[in-house]
Image (tube, rainbow, N blue to C red):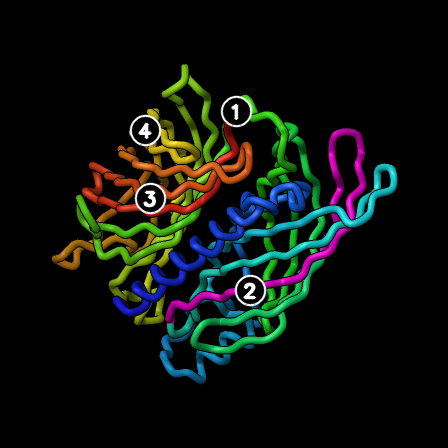
Amino acid sequence: MVGDQVRRVGWVALSGLVSAVALVVPARPGLSEELEHWRVVIAAVPIRWNTDGVHGHHLACRDRLCEAHDFSTGNLDNSFAYRLGLERDAWRLGRLAISGGLEVGMLFTEYNQSQRDFHISEALLVGGATAAVGPVDLILRGGIGGTYAHGERGGVARFLEGGAEFPLHEALGLRLTARVGSHAGPATKDFAFAFVAGKSGAEAPPVEFAWSGGLSLPGALHGKHRSLSTAPLVQVTAHWGLGTHDRIGVGVAATAHESGVRSDYGSVPDNERGKEIYEILCGWDRRLARRGVVELWGGAGLKVGAWGDQFPLMVDRGGNTVNGGIEGGVFAMLEGDVRVRDTLHVVLAGEQVYWPALEVGELRVRVGVRFAQ
């Protein structure tokens, strides 16, 4: 389990680094004018696998043949995916436009029978058509490329999606899409929301929006881990400025926690219980330092999370189940912020969360973007 967690941390850190580099490239001298019309698309996606047969941990089998069967039938764990894309219009006629670009993604999952974690990395060429209906753009997009399930197998990835994009501001849009995809065999369906950063030169939006993804490490600094393993997370926030140094914000977040203790799942033994924990949050941030395009922010706030579960997600050192429900928590945050394209910033944040009633602590590390001045 420790090896799986270390590998997961390493791959997410690498993914975050690649994403940051991809965002910084348009800001390099000599390229900004050439690439100013490229849009940056970043999304957090709850994925669902299309399973041929029974879905879930219906058989305790840690054999590679069982894992191959799970992969071929799509009996994989529903979890999160992160996506980053660059796109631009190639042709436009009135309200119609044809666009092209690139997309990279990472899907977190596991084999449901053996419950061994792995993740899938993808890179795709993307093309699409857009029709403007009033202020809303109707979108049809498709993509094809390569996929690799790390340590396992690879092949062709493809997808088709449709949806709509709503303007939040001249520099920012909110894209809602439904997608069906194939990943070297197993198929997914999802409903995604994405932020779309428009061209350079636009004024900053009056409300700052931020998206980030990363990892939760239970019990890393303060509090108990309750046998929870390292988990992927996503967070979306909106902030309002208070003067020149302060801001208040609200948001939603989700973590895909999993127990490190095996238990019975109905009549099937050897189960690692997993659950998505959804949260709402509010907080206050203050700019601590600013040097050129780099800023340092610190802040604190409150969270409310849905920890209720009918199965033993959390277990103490004595093997006793720790029951949760709607829980309140507190957090403290430190964030580094680099402006890379006018209103587009790359952020790297460390956050300590504590849930008093559960005595659970989480160190969260997030990489993402912020749309602000």
Which region shows up in magenta?
A: 115-141
Q: Which residue is depicted at the point 87% across and 42% down?
A: 93
Work out which residue is located at the far top of the displayed protein and give it: 243
Disc 3: which residue: 307
Q: CA distance from mark 1 to mark 4?
A: 21 Å
Q: Secondary structure at mark 3?
A: loop
Q: Which mark is residue 289?
A: 4
Regarding residue 183, the answer to whether it shows in the image is: yes
Q: Is residue 283 magenta?
A: no
Q: Main secondary structure of the magenta part?
A: strand
Residue 211 in sight here: no
Helix, strand or loop for disc 4: strand
**In the rendered image, which residue does mark 2 sit on?**
122
User: Residue beneath label 1, please?
Assistant: 207
In the image, what residue type sits under mark 3?
A: Trp
Q: Earlier in the sequence, mark 3 or mark 1?
A: 1
